[in-house]
Amino acid sequence: MSNDPLIHRPRRRRWIVMLTAGLTALGLILVGYGVAAPQGAPPAPSAAPVSEPIRAMPSELASTPLRVGLPESAPTSLRIPAIKVASVVNSVGLNPDETMEVPAPGPLYDQAAWYRSSPTPGELGPSVIIGHVDSAANGPSVFYELGALKVGDRIEATRADGAVVEFAVDTVRSFPKDAFPQQTVYGNTPGPELRLITCGGPFDASAGSYRNNTVVFARQIS
């Protein structure tokens, strides 16, 4: 994983394509963790959706009028009081093969990670923060209870510039990985929003990963 600030950042108009392409490979990379897990231990999931790359943004999303957001500043921490999450936020980018980096086993595994080619919290568009749900070695991880969030629950993202951006949960959805709605999750939004993503649903032992993704949709309120 890389914790560097915003360097070599892909152009914004490409981030959705590159993100979903990376997440496709992510599911394949993390299969090995589940297969290698000791018998009886919880499997390590993938931390984001497995899906086909987006070919193009729909015109109705691309033309949506956007209101003014905050300037760019990377998130440094995340608080979700309703599920007792208080995590450092690291950053992930792309590997040389253009797959997305993910929190690897080690000291940063149980921390949240912002995909640094998505908007920063408070900027226009959906800022994407991923996290593992559990691991074979240590059990529950940072987003273990993400699916328990309810409409109206608050999420606070602190940025490198000191600003604290508060979001309210609009909805919590579970999507099959083989029917993940990329445009719904990653498409343009009329204001600053947040997407928190982890794994969920039943565990597929043959694939070594969970079958679904839990996605929290939240909008900025302050």
Image (cartoon, rainbow, N blue to C red):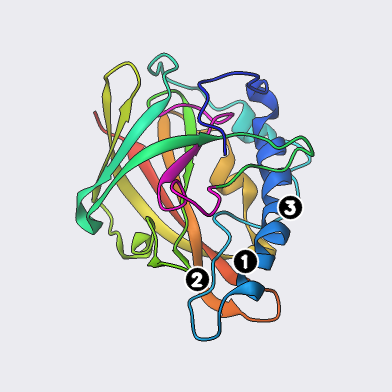
**Few, some or many C-alpha atoms within 10 Å of disc 3 (few <14, some 14-19, many ≥20)?**
some
Q: Is residue 164 above or below residue 70?
A: below
Q: Amino acid at mark 3?
A: Ala
Q: Which mark is residue 180?
A: none
**Few, some or many C-alpha atoms within 10 Å of disc 1 (few <14, some 14-19, many ≥20)?**
some
Q: Which mark is first along the chain, 2 or 1?
A: 1
Q: Position of residue 76 (x, y in %)?
A: 36, 30
Q: Which residue is mark 2?
A: 136
Q: Amino acid at mark 2?
A: Ala
Q: Which residue is mark 1?
A: 33
As helix, strand or loop, the secondary structure at mark 2 comes to loop
As helix, strand or loop, the secondary structure at mark 1 comes to helix
Identify the residue at horizontal 48%, vertical 52% (top origin): 197
Does the residue at mark 1 contact the one at mark 2 (Cβ under 8 Å)?
A: yes
Q: Which residues are magenta?
A: 103-121
Marks 3 and 2 sit apart, C-alpha to C-alpha, by 20 Å
Q: Left or right of 33: which side holds 133?
A: left
Q: Position of residue 154 (x, y in %)?
A: 23, 45
Q: Which mark is first along the chain, 2 or 3?
A: 3
Q: Position of residue 122 (x, y in %)?
A: 37, 25
The secondary structure that dominates the magenta segment is loop
As helix, strand or loop, the secondary structure at mark 3 comes to helix
Q: Is residue 107 magenta?
A: yes
Task: For marks 3 and 2, give the one nearer the viewer.
Answer: 2
Marks 1 and 3 sit apart, C-alpha to C-alpha, by 14 Å
Q: Position of residue 9 (x, y in %)?
A: 63, 21
Identify the residue at horizontal 46%, vertical 24% (top origin): 124
Q: Quadrant of residue 210?
A: bottom right
Q: Which residue is mark 3?
A: 25
Marks 1 and 2 sit apart, C-alpha to C-alpha, by 8 Å
Q: Left or right of 61: which side holds 190?
A: left
